[in-house]
């Protein structure tokens, strides 16, 4: 029995000798020598050992008692304690999740999640669109409470309109701002389905109040008077009155959108006055920018 006690004592002393030789422990003790009580080392030995063990596990990639956190020695009532701080990896993961939460995406392509201004290719006249996007980001970041006209990007299939909207949203998210992106044809289908369960008004209300809204691919679906007047019209009217920044992308110029998609309904009816009213709001909210270039869907690198 006595031998067992001696062995345990020797083992304990060896463990604590190793703890007191730890560089971080030595540095902490030296820095807080005047604050420590006389019996602080004895009473805090378990905390010091825990600190060194958790450090060792982290270094060797072993499971720790607080995954994602690293130990830090702190003073508490003249004794030594441990505070667990997020590891750099966890901080990066948390920051990435926060960025994703600032960009609300509805039926948008997955590649916009990683779209960046830096990776945007400027061939053709895409540089002009990129500069306009950067100007918008800078202006909004510097004065978010002022009204800033958005961009109406139009051009043929695959020239990077949607990608640029995604890059803008991600850049704004990095600066702490929330953006909502909607693929308008998919949103129109969702709105029609929502009529049966009486949720259409709530959906329109949520979209129209978005701090920054980006409407992608407007004009690509078969127009109906209800979508035009009670969905798109309501959203744009509210955003114009409240001067909320709004961006668009389309395969059609503003005039083409007005003369075709907004004027002629699915039934073939022509309502140019209502179309003109919608376009007045679009023109108030956004500056028209044509994009020309090769089809990026055949070569997905931006």
Image (cartoon, helix red, strand yellow):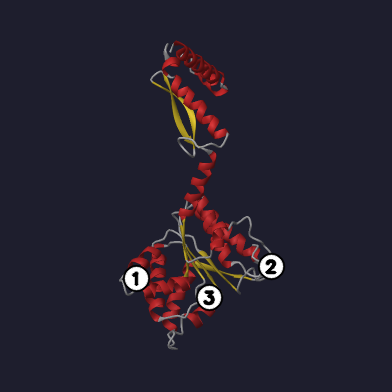
| For discs 2 and 3, the disc positioned in front in the rendered view | 2
Badge 2 or badge 3: first in the primary sequence: 2
Q: Nearer the viewer, residue 69 or 109?
A: 69
Distance from Cα at disc 2 to Cα at disc 3 = 21 Å
Where is mark 2, residue-wise? Answer: 124
Looking at the rendering, which quadrant does residue 201 occupy?
A: bottom left
Q: How many marks?
A: 3
Rendered position, 297 above or below 82: below
Is residue 36 at least partly visible in the picture? no
Q: Which residue is located at x 47 percent, y 73 percent? A: 185
Residue 110 at x, y percent in the picture:
54, 62
Q: Which residue is located at x 44 percent, y 10 percent? A: 2
| For discs 3 and 1, the disc positioned in front in the rendered view | 1
Q: Residue furthest right?
A: 123
**Mark 3 packing: few (<14 Cα in 10 Å), some, or many (20+)?**
some
Where is mark 3, residue-wise? Answer: 254
- What secondary structure is marked by label 2? loop
| Quadrant of the rendering where the N terminus is positioned | top left
Badge 1 or badge 2: first in the primary sequence: 2
Label placed on residue 87: none
Q: Nearer the viewer, residue 264 or 158?
A: 158
| For discs 1 and 2, the disc positioned in front in the rendered view | 1
Where is mark 1, residue-wise? Answer: 200
């Amino acid at each position: 029995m006595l031998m067992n006690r001696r062995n345990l004592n020797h083992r304990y002393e060896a463990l604590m000798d190793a703890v007191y030789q730890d560089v971080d422990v030595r540095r902490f003790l030296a820095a807080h020598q005047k604050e420590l009580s006389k019996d602080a080392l004895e009473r805090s030995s378990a905390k010091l050992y825990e600190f060194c063990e958790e450090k060792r596990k982290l270094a060797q990639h072993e499971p720790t008692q607080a995954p994602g956190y690293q130990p830090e020695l702190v003073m508490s009532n003249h004794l030594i304690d441990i505070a667990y701080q997020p590891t750099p990896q966890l901080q990066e993961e948390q920051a990435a999740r926060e960025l994703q939460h600032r960009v609300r995406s509805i039926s948008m392509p997955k590649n916009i999640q990683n779209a960046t201004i830096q990776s945007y290719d400027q061939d053709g006249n895409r540089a002009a669109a990129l500069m306009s996007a950067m100007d918008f980001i800078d202006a909004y970041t510097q004065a978010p409470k002022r009204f800033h006209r958005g961009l109406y990007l139009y051009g043929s299939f695959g020239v990077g309109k949607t990608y640029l909207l995604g890059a803008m949203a991600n850049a704004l998210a990095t600066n702490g701002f929330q953006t909502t992106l909607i693929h308008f044809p998919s949103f129109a289908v969702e709105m029609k389905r929502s009529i049966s369960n009486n949720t259409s008004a709530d959906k329109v209300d949520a979209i129209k109040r978005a701090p920054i809204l980006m409407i992608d691919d407007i004009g690509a679906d078969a127009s109906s008077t209800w979508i035009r007047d009670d969905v798109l019209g309501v959203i744009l009217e509210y955003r114009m009155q409240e001067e909320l920044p709004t961006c668009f992308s389309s395969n059609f110029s503003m005039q083409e959108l007005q003369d075709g998609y907004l004027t002629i309904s699915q039934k073939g009816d022509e309502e140019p006055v209502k179309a003109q009213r919608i376009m007045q709001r679009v023109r108030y909210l956004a500056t028209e920018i044509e994009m020309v270039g090769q089809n990026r869907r055949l070569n997905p690198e931006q």
